[in-house]
Amino acid sequence: MTATAPHFGPPPSVPAIRRPLAAAGLLAALIGVVFGLLLAVAGPASAHAALTGSDPQDGAVVDTAPKQVTLTFSEQVAMGEGSIRVLDPDGKRADTEAAPLDLHSGSTVKYGVALHTGLPDGTYTVAWQAVSADSHPVSGAFTFSIGAPSKTTVALPDNEAGGGLVGTLYGIARYAAYAGFIVLVGGAAFVLACWQRGAGARPLQRLVVRGWTTLTAATLAMLLLRNPYTGSGKLADAFDLDGLTAVLDTKPGAALVSRLLLLGASALFIAVLFGTYAKREDEREKKDLTFGLAIGGAVIAAGIAGTWALAEHASTGIQPGIAMPVDVLHLLAVATWLGGLAALLVALYRTPDVTADAVRRFSRIAFGSVLVVAATGIYQSWRQLGSWSALTDTGYGQLLLVKVGLVAVLVGVASISRRWTARLAADGGTAAAPVAEVMAGAGAGAETKADSDSVPQEPVSQDSVSQDPVSQDPARAVQLARQKAAVATAEKKRVRDADPDRSGLRRSVLAEVGVAVALLAVTTILTSTEPGRTEEEAARASNAAAAPASSGPVNLTLPFDTGGKNGRGTVRMDIDPGRTGANELHIWIADVNGEAMDVPEVKLALTLKSKDIGPLPVVPVRLTEGHWTAGGVQIPMAGNWNVSATVRTSDIDQTTVDKNVKIG
């Protein structure tokens, strides 16, 4: 790269001004399109855990009041007092209002609440709210009926947990936290690994410090908003000390506090980087300090990234032992890449002496970061999706497609930046470094030549020097020095901006940063969206519970012997249609010869032992000799039911026979 002599000509032409404006307009349009896509595919934020079953089921009709209501989840959840509420048709609490019972069995996550005894018939509403293991709140509601459905004064809530103003503020804080982390880590990495002289550049110092400030403020905001975000949804509860104390006892609360402590250590790192390190001149000492800062900074950055991995999606689901370190590596690679881009953009626009070697080093580091992001992203996608269908049929998969598209655009723009970098290096290696030297000498020469051309060369006496008003006024001398410095800086900027290679690199890096902003928005939404694997599992469980039975009518034949005279025979039973809901029951009783047998009494009971349901009594009525029937027999849920029949053949002779049969 060559430097030109100073030229104090007219201002840049109108087309030269319009080119940056046009680039900024195109960039704004791109970001607008991306956010439009986000609004189209992203519904309300939902969390990792999902309700996969309940007892009684949604919409079920049971003959007698159950002793308790249980909920089954796909992942571990946290519940407190009032997390499960059962309301009667009048809106009054039908449960005992105690904390939910932990009914875990193996890998099954189940909670329940006990109900009052003697509940009247009618429709009951179950409203629940919990916190998923990945820190996001989940909620829902459903109804069941005792005896028969009835009118209810309870309205099912249509808002989801974590919504409203508090949810919006919490989402903004999450985005700001990611952005601050990326700028903090990426900016510091750019200085240490690519351009160590940048430690003394004020624009880069301000960038990194602002990243630290943003991350710290966002973390504090999330800590205060955590209680209303997972609970009442009221902004005033952000300053509830009891609620804040409860938050500190949770995994997300501990992660946020740990992040604040690590940010305290990172403040010391920043002070050394932009203080002692920036002023160090001895090469050996600076090399040792670079190594120490690199190790310490990497440990702090990994710790801060771990506060996300330990409290969000990576900590739940399959293979958490692998997923958490992979997530930390993914976050560090993203920060190195995108945060370094932000630092490079600031260096190109605000510092005239950034070198082509620094740009070239960052280009290599960014390429390696992209490879790490791709490898870890593929693993995370497989873990969170689980199937190809989830890629297109779930909100998480659709957002992931948008993210992949943005990454592809970003890599494409980065390839353009690499070509500009190669041209910049080929033209002069350290491109901008000589500019300051050339401009300083050229400016001084120009001033000397101008003075010699316009003023006759006469000897200057000591008296004339003493009479010079500038020499007698120190304030005026300082003002002139500042003006000369401003002119020199403006000329250096003009020469720098006139270089087409550097201008092209600046525009391409600006485009990269714009796409990166949209990419960060998608990533933030993804972290609060229910993974495709969980969404499909919950949908399958819901469909299985709601689907009508395919087994068809149930036919049973049970031999019996009451022990008395003429006490032997068979009970033949038909349950039609043999599925959940109302069924028609017919019983035929025959003696040992197959003839219709008249008996004084027949009773039935249905028990689903796996769900602790029953026995549900059924009292059939006699139609004709040997033929009994019962209508509207309710089967609340599918499963292996035990059907028992009690037959009485005299005043003192009776027996009970039973058999397990799959219904629904």
Image (cartoon, helix red, strand yellow):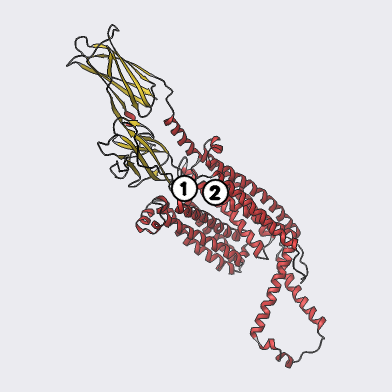
The quadrant the C terminus occupies is: top left
Residue 245, quarter of picture: bottom left
The residue under label 2 is 523
User: Please, is residue 300 above or below residue 580 in the view?
Assistant: below
Q: Is residue 448 left or right of residue 589?
A: right
Identify the secondary structure beneath mark 2: helix
| Residue 372 in sight here | no
Front-most of 595 and 530? Answer: 595
Q: Amino acid at mark 1?
A: Glu
Front-most of 432 and 99? Answer: 99
Q: Position of residue 605 (x, y in %)?
A: 28, 24
Identify the secondary structure beneath mark 1: loop
Q: Amino acid at mark 2?
A: Thr
User: Please, is residue 438 above or below residue 53 in the view?
Assistant: below
Q: Position of residue 318 (x, y in %)?
A: 47, 40
Q: Pointer 2 and pointer 1: residues touching (CB < 8 Å)?
A: no
- Crowding at dot 1, Cα within 10 Å, few <14 / some 14-19 / many 20+, comes out as many
The residue under label 1 is 312
Q: Position of residue 47 (x, y in %)?
A: 46, 44
Residue 397, quarter of picture: top right
Residue 609, quarter of picture: top left
Residue placed farthest to the top in the image? 593
Disc on the earlier residue, 2 or 1: 1
Residue placed farthest to the left in the image? 652
Identified at 82% across, 86% down, the residue is 457
